[in-house]
Image (tube, rainbow, N blue to C red):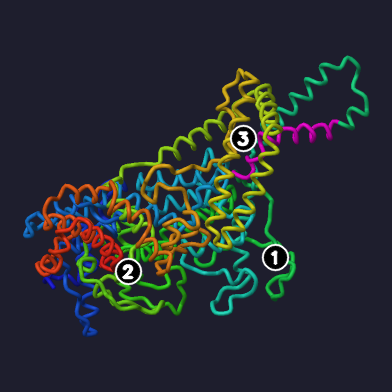
Amino acid sequence: MTSFPNLHLLVLSTGILLSSLSISHAEKLPLQMITNSAAEIDYIIENANKAKGIQPNPIVDDATFLRRSYISIIGRIPTYQETKSFLDLDAKSPNKRSDLLDSLVYSKGYNSQIFNFYANLLRLQTSRDQHGLGWHMWLKKAVNDNMPYNKMVFEMLSATGHCSETPAVGYALRDRGMLLDNISNTAKIFLGTQIGCAQCHDHPFEDWTQKQYYELAAFGSQIDYQSLGAQKKIQETVAFKINQNNKEKTAKRTRKDAQNLKGLRRSESRDLRSLFKDFNKNATYVKAGKELKLPSNYEYNDGKPGDTVTPHVLFGNLSTKSDKKDIPPHEQLATWVTSNSNPMFTKVFANRLWKHALGYGLVEPVDNWTERSNMSHPEVLDTLVQILHASDYDTRELLRVIYHTKTFQRAACDFEITDGRVHDFRGPMLRRMSAEQIYDSLLTLEKGNIDALENIAQQIKWEQYTSGIDSIFSATPQQIIKIDDQLDIEEDATRKYQQVVRELRIKKAQAANDDKKSEIAKIDRKLAKLYAKIKEVRAKVKSDQKMSMDTSMVPMSNLRVRDRKLLRASEMSSPFKPGSFARDFGASDRITTDSQHTHASIPQALTMLNGKQIKTITDENGKMAQQMKSAHRGEQRLDVLFLSIYNKYPSKQERTDLKYVARSRQDIKILAKAMLNSKRFLFIQ
């Protein structure tokens, strides 16, 4: 390796340098600081391996580096032109690779890749009531704005209110009514600690008790699921209606009237349910005095069934600020989790990013740190933590450091590691592209660079919804009554169709469980016709009513967005549907955290051989197909194939072996399909 004078002091000196500078989160760190930190990491790894007699893998060639960088950083292979532009640069250019890395890290493609990382980690589900889309849009903006990771987590853990006002509340609503599950996921995701077993009994293998589990969950005990804004608006409207009715009476109110007043309020409130039925599904609030109690079957000596549980953190202490009684318990938890003094929060995230970049964590599993966990190169983790602290938890800058290491540029390790064992990081791990990366790479071959294309339909849908909610909250009682009457008429007119829709959805779910794709397609066609009929009936009702009020004031109860255009995976609704391309290739169902996988299957093989994506790329009007048509000689066609699919020029031997195939336009299409099915395409080398 290159000799760096006094590099053994660089761990300390770089930490001092980072902490002594006042770096704004939005500010790009100086390249020299990035390369120094990267060199520091390389030095630690190579010295530790040298002591064990382990030699580092060689540095990869430009073509392999190019392809690995694109897939790892922006989640897709480079286009034909992007490949050609990089490979044709002077190989001796000292900044060639560094310039490429920085251009990718600061590109829109990076936002797409890191959004998928967060969505899998947090179990994002776009169509989960209205709050699902709101959380999706909030997370997307947080990524695009490069929000500090600690701030992002704090906002999610501390958010309350209606999702239209605080969409980060989607994190809590993701596990609506399941406090114990939510706290288990919180510990696993942000602290790398699996305490789920202690929900029902003391952990059989770790030092976590059931009492400790409930003490941590008690921080969320005051969270209740209700929209205070909607409740206030209902009360105002009911009071208005009752007052109006009383004004119409000439006689003095009787005792019977007084007795019936309470029932009348309930009746009038129920009458407004068509308008406010979804508000409580999409909001939380702090209910002071609400407590968590030990379960009725609790059987340990440190408490009795039904005892009230006092909130307590798993380790360390709450900060002085969090001890103030006016701070709600869930916000105290958010402060403790994201504090710089909480060692697990920063270490776990740094380790996740290291695995994201290199394929394996410094600690494995990344979400189950215990006293028995093995750690490779602890000094590297310490350095990553220092960088996160100094850069104000800047995800982009930490990844930028990792990508600038020689470790990232070395040949991949093609051996398997048993989960939990340490990796020496003589090079990154050889791994298959994720489902989203394959999806986006095939899309690149068909459409070229579409990183800048956004799902405008999602944004429009969300803006319409929030506008409707805002209008409801600011409407007068007279307006509320008029809107509710309109919705009642629409509901009556479409009730029979909606009943059929519910029945078909049940049948569709059963067909999905049985993997009956033809039956699912048939049901989808019936549903499409019913939705069209419901839309037609509603439009006719509104036309007949000739309402003077703007109908945009009515919030939509269904925010599912139809993704009609071909867009990057990050722009699609989450999760991908069962039976879709991405799900067949292992995309997460977003039920559990990081449930994506790269296991091979027969549906994958059939899709890559005969799927419409492959046909479009090789036979029809995709970018690569057009370039193939414009190539007049076999050698040119071969260049197009290799530069597009493998992102490198064919070798001299490959030109010789394939020259006869390249002469035939039909045969070279078959070659293209074979290349797309090869491990050379599907794996990140």
Could you say which disc has been placed on residue 294 in the image?
Answer: 1
Q: Mark 1 or mark 3, which is nearer the start of the sequence?
A: 1
Q: In the rendered structure, which amino acid carries the disc numbered 1?
A: Leu
Does the stretch in magenta take in 369? no
Q: Pointer 3: residues within 10 angstroms few (<14), some, or many (20+)?
A: many
Image location of residue 659, percent across then percent down: 12, 64
Mark 1 crowdedness (10 Å alpha carbons): few <14, some 14-19, many ≥20: some
In space, the residues marked 3 and 1 are separated at their CA atoms by 48 Å
Residue drawn at point x = 58 percent, y = 63 percent: 514
Farthest residue to the right: give it.
Answer: 255
Total marks drawn?
3
The crowd level at tag 2 (other Cα within 10 Å; few <14, some 14-19, many 20+) is some
Q: Does residue 493 sit above or below 350 in this rendering?
A: above
Q: CA distance from mark 2 to mark 3?
A: 48 Å
> Relative to 579, does residue 564 appear above or below in the rendering?
above
The residue type indicated by label 2 comes to Arg
In this rendering, the answer to whether 675 lies above or below 533 is below
Residue numbers of the magenta segment:
261-282
Name the residue nearer the viewer: 402 or 573. Answer: 573
- What residue did someone put label 2 on? 431
Relative image position of residue 137 (x, y in whole percent): 45, 43
Rendered image: mark on residue 534: 3
Q: Amino acid at mark 3?
A: Ile
Nearer-N-terminus badge (2/1) = 1
Left or right: 91, with 450 as reference point: left
**Residue 285 figure quarter:** top right
Q: Is residue 224 left or right of residue 336?
A: right
**Depth-wise, is mark 2 or mark 3 nearer the camera?**
3
| Dot 2: element | strand
Q: Which residue is farthest bottom? A: 53
Residue at x 65%, y 23% (from the top left corner): 479
